[in-house]
Image (cartoon, rainbow, N blue to C red):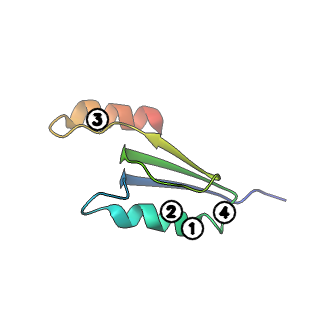
């Protein structure tokens, strides 16, 4: 039997972000359908995530697209 896994790539996993807060909620809702979820994100904030969700933050920096892209690719 195969494990049910999901990889998500998004910009922000901050529940207090004024624009991208919905991404945090979407991951929480998807967590009931998957055994493991890995999220590669540019920014993360504080929030209670389910135990089957792992966040990898790349530390995307505004105004530094090349170095941010390299950090992102390294995490991916």
In space, the residues marked 3 and 1 are separated at their CA atoms by 27 Å
Report the residue at 29% width, 39% height from top.
Answer: 60
Mark 1 Cα shell of 10 Å, populated few (<14), some (14-19), many (≥20): few
Q: Are marks 1 and 4 in contact (CB under 8 Å)?
A: yes
| Residue in the picture at 24% in, 62% down | 18
Residue 35: % across, % down: 70, 58
Give the CA distance from mark 3 to mark 2: 23 Å
In the rendered image of this protein, does residue 15 appear above or below residue 71?
below
**SS label for mark 3:** helix
| Label 4: few (<14), some (14–19) or many (≥20) C-alpha neighbours in 10 Å | few
- Residue under numbered circle 4: 34
Q: Mark 3 and 1 residues: CB-CB less than 8 Å, in contact?
A: no
Residue assigned mark 1: 30
Query: Earlier along the polypeptide chain: callout 4 or callout 3?
Result: 4
Task: Calculate the distance from the C-alpha at mark 4 to the C-alpha at mark 3.
Answer: 29 Å
Residue in view at x 64 percent, y 52 percent? 51
The alpha-carbon separation of the residues under discs 2 and 1 comes to 5 Å
Q: Nearer the viewer, mark 3 or mark 1?
A: 1
Q: SS at mark 2?
A: helix
Q: Going by the image, does 52 lie left or right of 64? A: right
Callout 4 secondary element: loop
- Viewed as shown, does residue 53 lie left or right of 9? right
**Residue occupied by mark 3:** 68
Give the mark nearest the N terminus, 3 or 2.
2
Image spot of residue 43 (x, y percent): 34, 45
Mark 2–mark 4 Cα distance, whole angstroms, equals 10 Å
Q: Quadrant of residue 67?
A: top left
Q: Which residue is mark 2?
A: 27
Residue extending farthest right? 1
The residue depicted at 66 percent of the width and 63 percent of the height is 34
């Amino acid at each position: 039997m195969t494990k049910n896994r999901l990889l998500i790539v998004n910009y922000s996993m901050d529940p207090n972000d004024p624009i991208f807060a919905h991404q945090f909620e979407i991951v929480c809702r998807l967590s009931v359908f998957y055994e493991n979820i890995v999220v590669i994100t540019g920014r993360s904030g504080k929030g209670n995530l389910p135990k089957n969700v792992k966040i990898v933050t790349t530390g995307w920096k505004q105004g530094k697209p090349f170095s941010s892209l390299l950090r992102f690719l390294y995490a991916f």
